[in-house]
Amino acid sequence: MANREALKEFQSRLAQRLQAARDESVSVSSWLAVESGGRRYLLPLAQSGEIFPWGGVQSVPYTQAWFLGMANLRGTLNGVVDLAGLLGDARPRSEQALLESSVLALNGALEVNAALLVDRLAGLRGAQAFVASEPPEPGAPGYFGGVYVDDQGIRWQELDLLALSRHPTFLSISA
């Protein structure tokens, strides 16, 4: 009998919390914020997948310098792309810098077995984290979304991972 009362009390508290969450203007995160090559990017959560530590990437000969190789991520082979290198920052990384990096798999719904190497994960962000936004600069690649400015004046470039995964440069890994 006591278990039933405890269960009813738990269900009642849970229902109250759910209602309170609906009533409040709960902030929803839209992006995964990352840093790569000294720049800051916003990656849509719906297009992002699992995050892995750097390691186990096998190089592939005769490929672009930004294509780091292949990695087995939870039983699926993924091509690993250095995001900074792909976007024009060709600085080589030390082994220590690689060990501090993360590999972000693209969401399986994008139907491309690829992952991005990023220097640092900077958390989740929602629109409320920014004080201004601007359209992409003229001539920017088609996978660049808007630019968002936070309250410290830091600019964050949104990247459309679906458009990136379909872009000819991303798909042309051969050197």
Image (cartoon, grey):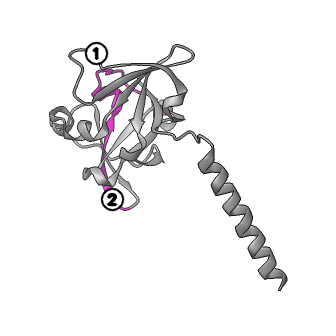
Expressed as whole percent of the image width and height from the top left, the position of residue 107 reads 35, 50
Quadrant for the C terminus in the image: top left
The answer for how far apart the CA atoms under marks 2 and 1 are is 36 Å
Expressed as whole percent of the image width and height from the top left, the position of residue 169 reads 18, 32
Identify the residue at horizontal 15%, vertical 35% (top origin): 168
Give the total of numbered labels: 2
Q: In the drawing, does residue 83 fall left or right of residue 12? A: left
Q: Pointer 1: what residue?
A: 137
| Pointer 2 with pointer 1, Cβ within 8 A | no
Position of residue 29 relative to residue 2, above or below, is above
Q: Pointer 2: what residue?
A: 76
**Span colored in magenta:** 75-95
Q: In the drawing, does residue 170 fall left or right of residue 76? A: left
Quadrant for the N terminus in the image: bottom right
Estimate how packed mark 2 is, as few (under 14), some (14 to 19) or many (20 or more) residues with alpha carbons within 10 Å: few
Identify the residue at horizontal 67%, vertical 50% (top origin): 20
Residue type at the position of mark 1: Glu
Residue type at the position of mark 2: Thr
Expressed as whole percent of the image width and height from the top left, the position of residue 127 reads 48, 30
